[in-house]
Image (cartoon, rainbow, N blue to C red):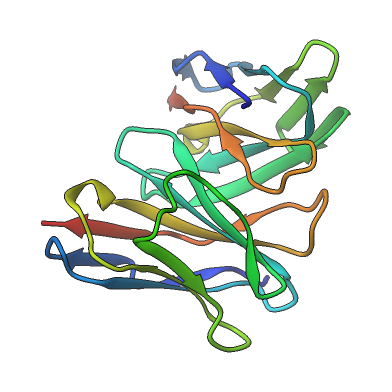
Amino acid sequence: EPEVTQTPSHQVTQMGQEVILRCVPISNHLYFYWYRQILGQKVEFLVSFYNNEISEKSEIFDDQFSVERPDGSNFTLKIRSTKLEDSAMYFCASSRDRGKYEQYFGPGTRLTVT
Amino acid sequence: KNEVEQSPQNLTAQEGEFITINCSYSVGISALHWLQQHPGGGIVSLFMLSSGKKKHGRLIATINIQEKHSSLHITASHPRDSAVYICAVRDQGAQKLVFGQGTRLTINP
């Protein structure tokens, strides 16, 4: 069964460093998402991406964040200058299209900023 | 902005018991999702529904649009059902999900 994959599974970085989290969505899906979950808190929406542009973004998704689909398979989240409060589990998800389609989640990348 | 509340926050039961987890939301939605999060952190989609009832194995999900309420039921619960169950809603006209805080379910043998 097709699945969303994410790399790395765990990333440790120092404050101020740039990180890139990678996702490979399900191949025939057109809508992509990034969510994050700070330890002990709710999952929060960051950004959605459709037709090679950002479709929606939350207040969390400020200028420090960017997303890109550099080729036909990868979907990346870049954090330019990490802060301690960026430590969280980051989930990528994809859905077949807009509308009432299920979102399929990747296993997550645990980002630890020291 | 939709507010999603789940109850209970924690639930411990004995194997075989019938489990109910509740979810309420504040604003009309286009769809509601029930998700399962395992101890390792991974999230699995269980159901997506916008009306009525869906059943998959021992899991049943219902939604009452007028009441803005959904329930997830587990029949004949088993220790492997132990996980965090999360309700998430999609607002009308939006694609993003708004999540509840989750219900931690522990089934003891």
Residue extending furthest right? B52
Q: How many badges with numbers are in the image?
A: 0
Q: Residue B2, position in %: x, y?
A: 63, 25
Position of A43 with respect to A51 (left or right) is: left
Position of A95 with respect to A77 (left or right) is: right
Q: As rendered, which of B32 and B8 lies closer to the eye?
A: B32
Looking at the image, can residue B56 be seen?
Answer: no
Q: Residue A75, position in %: x, y?
A: 53, 75
Looking at the image, can residue B37 be seen?
Answer: yes
Residue extending furthest bottom? A71
Position of B19 with respect to A98 (left or right) is: left
Q: Is residue A59 above or below residue B109?
A: below
Residue extending furthest front? A63
Corner quadrant of residue B3: top right
> Which residue appears at 79% of the width and 36% of the height?
B92
Q: Residue A83, position in %: x, y?
A: 20, 54
Position of A55 with respect to A92 (left or right) is: right
Q: Is residue A82 above or below residue A75?
A: above
> Which residue appears at 46% of the width and 43% of the height?
A59
In the picture, which quadrant includes the N terminus of chain A? Answer: bottom right
Q: Residue A76, position in %: x, y?
A: 46, 73
Corner quadrant of residue A65: bottom left
In the picture, which quadrant includes the C terminus of chain A? Answer: bottom left
Q: Is residue B67 above or below residue A23?
A: above
> Which residue appears at 46% of the width and 40% of the height?
A43
Q: As rendered, which of A114 and B14 lies closer to the eye?
A: A114
